[in-house]
């Protein structure tokens, strides 16, 4: 494998594009897989991030094979050779186009909401995807940028076939690719983790980039941090809007990190509501491979308590109450840490959590606690009901109808965000010190 995941690919691509730093650059990611890659590049270059909405037109009986693409502003690219070889009729092509155009419009509303596309006229536009196969979607994206007046177009991807420059050289002014392997069958073969990117992750990437831009303009604090926890240093990101009413520290679940798209989605919603957030890695990169540490609730709770002490010493936290948001096994760590008198936590929210793993610590928790569970997550719902009986503090169990453990259903993560926002804002009283 050439890349562990899209985040690593994005970081490596950002290093290759560092020469663009300081220029008037806009980064456009192709949803869905290209957006996490593009987000890494945009952050590294200090450039705004937007999506370039393109939909592949898949051959009816072999949808993974692209016979063209549709894009915003009426852009349409058809690969006549594929259409001819696959014997696709004009009626079949029209039917696929109609379906994909509807999805294109729906995705625009989902990803951008009321925001208008970022202007690219007269600027350098970097178009990014997680890789190029047939090139139809990349070609359409470049044409969209050209139609909107981009002064220069750079098409940048982590991986592509060896002949990709022949296919796309006329649509971009500059082509950048990290790897062009000889035996190329599909983009996913070059990633160890090529998990499908969900709409929530795309929206979270865009919201994060928007929040970073707004923060720069309005004194909004948003910075990468190093947290000392015992003998280790942990990476994190501290975001504190101006006049924040409090700061929420996130404790992620097993197999996740500060880059968790679901936690970042919730964090962006809290930021918009005037709450600060700290997302950080509970384990170092070396420790993440040790399954014993991943499920060591006491260790994770200790790290969370250390991060809380570190946060209280930061100028952004002065006089502001602190809350915990725990996901999955991270919820157990959050409740365990909240049971410690020195943490002085104003409120706790658990998303699909395992509060049962906090065991005998539950009765010692004094922080108002909200347990959010998906209605279809039957086993975890039962564990939360049992754990709630062990809490002596103010508590509530909120069930999101139809949601499964990861809250991947439409609207489920938005419901989690709204519940968490209301709980924190209702309980963020000034901390007693």
Image (tube, grey):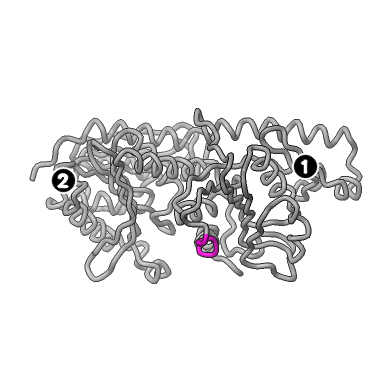
Tell me the element at label 2: loop
**Residue depicted at 51% across the width and 60% down the height:** 14
- Residue 243 in picture, x, y percent from top left: 23, 36
Based on the displayed image, in which of its 4 quarters is residue 149 positioned?
Answer: top right
Nearest the viewer among 114 and 309 is: 114
Q: Residue furthest left?
A: 433
* Range drawn in magenta: 15-19
Name the residue beneath numbered marker 1.
77
- Residue 166 in picture, x, y percent from top left: 78, 60
Q: Relative to 141, is 22 above or below?
A: below
Can see residue 331? no
Q: CA distance from mark 1 to mark 2?
A: 55 Å
Q: Quadrant of the C terminus?
A: top left
Name the residue beneath numbered marker 2.
318
Tell me the element at label 1: strand
Nearest the viewer among 249 and 302 is: 249
For the stretch drawn in magenta, the main secondary structure is helix
């Amino acid at each position: 494998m050439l890349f562990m995941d899209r985040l690593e690919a994005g970081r490596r691509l950002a290093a290759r594009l560092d020469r663009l730093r300081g220029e008037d650059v806009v980064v456009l990611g192709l949803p869905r897989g290209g957006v996490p890659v593009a987000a890494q590049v945009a952050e590294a270059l200090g450039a705004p991030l937007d999506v370039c909405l393109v939909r592949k037109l898949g051959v009816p009986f072999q949808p993974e094979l692209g016979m063209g693409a549709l894009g915003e502003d009426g852009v349409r690219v058809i690969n006549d050779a594929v259409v001819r070889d696959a014997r696709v009729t004009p009626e079949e092509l029209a039917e696929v186009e109609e379906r994909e155009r509807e999805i294109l419009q729906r995705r625009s509303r989902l990803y951008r909401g009321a925001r208008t596309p970022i202007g690219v006229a007269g600027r350098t536009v970097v178009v990014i995807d997680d890789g190029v196969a047939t090139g139809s979607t990349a070609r359409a994206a470049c044409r969209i940028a050209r139609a909107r007046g981009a002064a220069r177009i750079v098409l940048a991807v982590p991986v592509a076939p060896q002949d990709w420059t022949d296919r796309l050289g006329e649509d971009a002014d500059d082509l950048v690719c990290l790897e062009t392997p000889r035996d190329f069958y599909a983009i996913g073969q070059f990633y160890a983790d090529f998990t499908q990117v969900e709409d929530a992750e795309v929206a979270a990437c865009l919201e994060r980039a928007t929040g970073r831009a707004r923060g720069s303009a309005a004194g909004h604090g948003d910075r990468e941090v190093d947290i000392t926890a015992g003998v280790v240093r942990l990476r994190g990101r501290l975001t504190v809007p101006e006049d924040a009413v409090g700061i929420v520290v996130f404790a992620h679940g097993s197999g996740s990190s500060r880059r968790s798209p679901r936690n970042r989605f919730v964090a962006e919603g809290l930021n918009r509501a005037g709450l600060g957030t700290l997302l950080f890695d509970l384990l170092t990169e070396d420790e993440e491979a040790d399954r014993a540490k991943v499920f060591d609730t006491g260790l994770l709770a200790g790290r969370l308590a250390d991060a809380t002490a570190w946060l209280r010493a930061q100028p952004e936290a002065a006089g502001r109450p602190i809350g915990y948001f725990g996901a999955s096994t991270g919820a157990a760590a959050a409740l365990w840490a909240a049971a410690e008198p020195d943490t002085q936590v104003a409120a706790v929210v658990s998303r699909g959590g395992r509060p049962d793993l906090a065991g005998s610590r539950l009765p010692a928790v004094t922080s108002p606690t909200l347990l959010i569970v998906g209605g279809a997550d039957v086993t975890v719902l039962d564990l939360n009901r049992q754990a709630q009986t062990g809490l002596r503090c103010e508590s509530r169990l909120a069930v999101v109808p139809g949601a499964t453990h990861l809250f991947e259903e439409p609207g489920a993560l938005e419901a989690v965000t709204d519940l968490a926002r209301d709980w924190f804002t209702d309980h963020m009283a000034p901390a007693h010190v």
